[in-house]
Amino acid sequence: MNDERPFERLATHSGPAEVDPGFADRLYALLQQETRRPGRSARPALLLVAALLAILAITAAVAVGSGLIKLPWVDRLLIPNPSPMSTIVPIPSPTSTIAAPRTVLTWTRVAVDERSLAPAQGSLDEPRATGVAWLGDRFVLVDETRAIKAVSTSTDGREWVLLDQSDPGWDSYSLLSATSAIATWDHDTVLWTSGVYTSDLRILRPPDEPITKSDFSGGVGAVGIGPAGIVAQVHSALDFDAFVTSQLGAGWVEHMVSFSFQDGVLRITTDDDRALEIVWADAGFEPGDVADGGFGWYSPDGDQWTPIPSFPANVWEIVGASDGFFARGAEGRCDGCRDTAGGLGMWHSPDGLSWLRIGDVTQGDATDGSVLPWGQGVLVTDGTGRFDVWTAEGTSELPMAGELPPSWTASNVSFGSVSFGNGPLGLVSVNVDDHEVLFTPNGVDWSIQPMSAEMAAAADLSRTAPGWNVAVGKDSVIVLLWAGENPGVPSIWVGTLGP
């Protein structure tokens, strides 16, 4: 190696980003020698300083290139924006390879065939079920009155196809308007009628024929579907109050002092000296029959069903997630029941069959908001101020929750004014009272956008049921808005990232 020509070596170096360990020392010694030669000016001293700086730059470049040091602007430069419209703004960089998640949606009104979405008609006495949902690879719009039932599908939310009854998928999609409860995962959908004691449960896998499960002993209360299968909570067929009344007489509830079910024995006492002690199995009942604690059923495919041996009692919500299932309920709400110390809670199951309590919820939190799939767990949210994430390890809050402006998180949002939904693109919450839309792709980056004047005019009616108003797909969002007097004039809006 010719150490007398170091600058030529630097200029012509084209190999891997490595520096000879002794190169810097030899370069330094050579420059010192140059400055000490007789007749030399002060210029070489400046050259020495510049060369040393070059050595430091080369060393830093090697460290960066090898991954020992990662500069924040190599991937992307993010600058916090104090505006509530967005917390993160991407700054272009020549070395940028990963763009910051975009959080601004562009909204456009979609002109659909009047046969797909009929204009307002009738009155509040005229039942109308209208809703939009994302089912794995397409949006489905269903509009049903006594006179018509229209089913339309779209892959992007802009172009819609009105289905005929002979088209594949009609039998499945048309059922969406005939139910008040829906759970989806990818291309699969489960339907049931919530709050009504019916055992009918339908599983949709278009274009296959729907699967119907209708032989549960009691009504279906809650259902979750995910990659691990389907879990259903089924009410007891026993009229528990009537049974106890037959044993203790009328008015026992008003005089009840203690209530317990332990070791298979039901015990009730009253303040007027009435008492009941009965071995529950001897009476022909099961633990799930106590105070309608309910039963759990699991199916891997919708065809074969297995009773869940240790399903938590009094569950009212079940959600399928990437990591199994989550359930919210009130097991132990009575004296002596299991987990009396903390009756209201959240449970997790990795397989639908084994369940573990993962945390308590307060009385106010027990029924607030909805439970939605989110990452490896679920998100409990009301769309405005509550954004709690639950995983098998417990609970935490979305990072954005502490950054949202008070005007959005105010607790006085009127009932029915906020509709929200989530899907592959993220979470979208629409406040029709304040004419604003919240969007977050990941719970970290977010924006709150004011509606355009046209969109706000189409959103002057709060309406939560019947139907579903927000559907979030892979690349776009569909929002169903209502205007005018009840039952309102519907319109469809599509939100997309970018212009």
Image (cartoon, grey):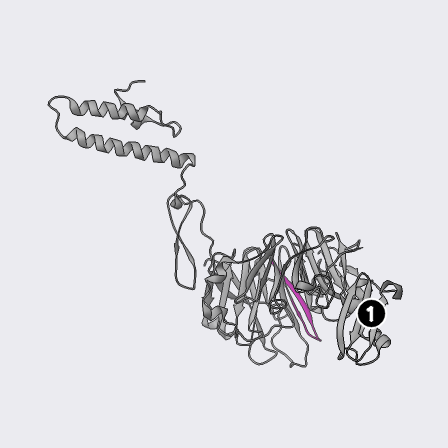
Tell me the residue at 40%/28% (across/down).
Answer: 16
Q: Please tell me whether the stretch drawn in magenta is mainly helix, strand or loop.
A: strand
Residue at 41 percent across and 41 percent down: it is: 70
Compare residues 27 and 191 and report the one nearer the observer. Answer: 27
* 460 in relation to 324, above or below: below
Q: What residue sits 73% from the left and 57% below the top? A: 231
**Residue 464 location (% of width, % of height):** 61, 72
Q: Which residues are magenta?
A: 142-154
Image x and y of residue 279, in percent: 86, 65
Q: Secondary structure at mark 1?
A: loop
Residue 148 to residue 376: above or below: below
- Residue at numbered disc 1: 238
Most extreme residue toward the left is 39
Q: Pick whichever, 441 or 122, lies toward us.
A: 441
User: Along the horizontal axis of the image, is 118 left or right of 91?
Assistant: right
Q: Is residue 373 magenta-colored?
A: no
Q: Quadrant of residue 1?
A: top left
> Residue visible at 43% across and 60% down?
86
Q: Amino acid at mark 1?
A: Leu
218 relative to 91 in the view: left or right: right
User: How many residues crowd around disc 1 within 10 Å: few (fewer than 14), some, or many (20 or more)?
Assistant: some
Q: How many numbered dots are placed on residues in this image?
A: 1
Dividing the picture into quarters, in which one does residue 67 lie?
A: top left
Q: Is residue 112 visible?
A: yes
Q: Quadrant of the C terminus?
A: bottom left
Q: Position of residue 447 (x, y in %)?
A: 46, 62
